[in-house]
Amino acid sequence: MKALILKDKMQFVYGDVPKPVPAKNEVLIRIKAVSVCGSDIAGSDGSTGRRRPPIVMGHEASGIIEETGSKATRFAKGDRVTFDSTIYCGTCRFCRSGRVNLCDNRRVLGVSCQEYRQHGAFCQYIALPEHIVYKLPDNVTISITCGRGAAKALDAAGAQSTFCQAVQCLQKGGIFVTLANLENAFPSIFPKW
């Protein structure tokens, strides 16, 4: 599958990585919309220590269920979904008290620090535990759910936010929220999926 890989400080490569296979409690999501968070921008220069190359960044995204693991029962192929940016265990004292953001075993999507490397959503597919995935209501567009600001701005402008737009924007050093419909502006850079 294709992914946007941070290969070195401020150096992104659009390349191939293995397509994930969902574990028994996971779902495979085909990414349809992704936003560039401020932490992605700050982390790409290496100053935070939380984006150690090589890493597929991105944690604000949404998409469509492509496949489910053998024990994943909450979703079906074709369901439109979004997900938490943090994979939490659900069993530690923090998770049991509802404070999953403090989970002893948490892994943030798109982060590679000294403790772990967890590839994120700047790619075509991502496999995630079904307990951090949420079905979208019919009246909510996929692009609205992928980020707090960028996707809402693009959706309001009538643009369809896509993985290709994020890739193009990052390669050009731009801010995602200020650009709309890059796929039409730069059709020769990436193929349409």
Image (cartoon, rainbow, N blue to C red):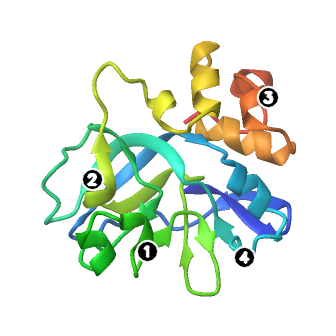
Res 103 quadrant in image: bottom left
Label of residue 106 in the image: 1
Residue under label 4: 52
- Give the distance between the C-alpha atoms of the residues marked 4 and 1, in whole angstroms: 17 Å
**What residue did someone put label 3 on?**
186
Rendered location of residue 74, percent (x, y) = 16, 50
Disc 4 to disc 1: CB gap under 8 Å: no
In the image, 67: left or right of 85?
A: left
Whether residue 84 sits left or right of residue 96 in the image: it is right
What's under tag 3, amino acid-wise?
Answer: Phe
Q: Position of residue 117 (x, y in %)?
A: 57, 78
* Label 3 SS: loop
Is the C-beta separation of discs 3 and 2 under 8 Å? no
For badge 4, the amino acid type reads Arg
**Which residue shows up at 73% across the image and 36% down it?**
176
Q: Which amino acid is tagged 2?
A: Glu
Q: Nearer the viewer, residue 91 or 178?
A: 91
Q: Where's residue 37, x and y in %?
A: 66, 48
Q: Are marks 4 and 2 in contact (CB under 8 Å)?
A: no
**Nearer the N terminus, badge 1 or badge 2?**
2
Comes first in the chain, label 3 or label 1: 1
